[in-house]
Amino acid sequence: MKIDILTLFPEMFSQVFEESILKRAQESGKVEIRIINFRTFSNDPHQKVDDTPYGGGHGMVLTCQPIFDCIESLRTEDTKVIMLTPDGVLYKQKMAYTLAKEKHLILLCGHYEGFDERIRTLCDYEISIGDYVLTGGEIPAMILADSIIRLLPGVIEEESHLQDSFNDQLLDYPAYTKPRVYRGMEVPEVLVSGDHKKIDEFREQMRYNRTVERRPDLLEK
């Protein structure tokens, strides 16, 4: 898979993709990540990429030309373009699985007061990571990339992500490791029983109980 991230602040990504699983995924050739400053595509002598909004209002709006030219220079028949925007579809694990099947993703990071509306015509998806507003689309782009890359074949063991929270509308079960007792808190007896059938049943019940307690809205769906 190829992931191109279009941003005005490429330095924000300098460490994110150089650690842990994301770094190994690139080194093994599972994914190619490019960080592209779309300011370099501006035809303005001063590489200006924003302007005041028609009709008045606060802030500046990202202009069409640099973004159109940037995306059109990268796009192929296998490309899906994603705009990160607060008014997009709320991002869920199911969408991560869908996007992990694509060959080439372009993640478009907004800034300032948003995009000229016509830029939306370039996009296949408009995605929000939550009902709140950030200073730009860079952090959402990091989140999308992380959630997608870990699902690519060979990046992590398939069983690991198949048991993740949200895959079947349930949260994950609680996990424990050594020591068996810590500050008076004991590991549940069933987990050291060696009875794998009972362990599976316990974990499934804990997933349900935790979802009822913390995210009952998932069960309603």
Image (tube, rainbow, N blue to C red):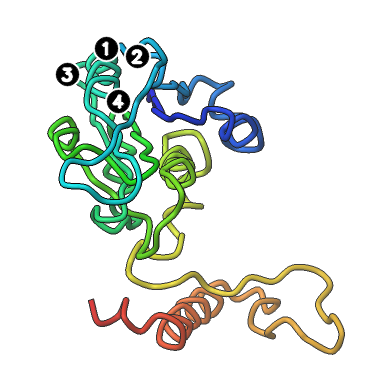
Nearer mark to the viewer, of 3 and 2: 2
Mark 2 secondary-structure assignment: helix
Q: Residue at x 50, y 82 (%)?
A: 206
Position of 10 with respect to 18 (left or right) is left
Label 2 environment density (alpha carbons within 10 Å; few <14, some 14–19, many ≥20): some
Front residue of 200 and 181:
181
Nearer mark to the viewer, of 1 and 4: 1
Q: Which residue is drawn at 25% across and 82% down?
A: 220
Q: Do callouts 1 and 2 mark residues in contact (Cβ within 8 Å)?
A: yes
Residue identifier under label 1: 73
Res 41 label: 2
The quadrant in which the C terminus is found is bottom left
Residue identifier under label 4: 103
- What is the C-alpha distance between the residues marked 3 and 2? 21 Å
Residue identifier under label 3: 77
- What is the C-alpha distance between the residues marked 4 and 3? 10 Å
Depicted 90 relative to depicted 184: above or below? above
Q: Do callouts 1 and 3 mark residues in contact (Cβ within 8 Å)?
A: no
Mark 1 secondary-structure assignment: helix
- What is the C-alpha distance between the residues marked 1 and 2? 10 Å
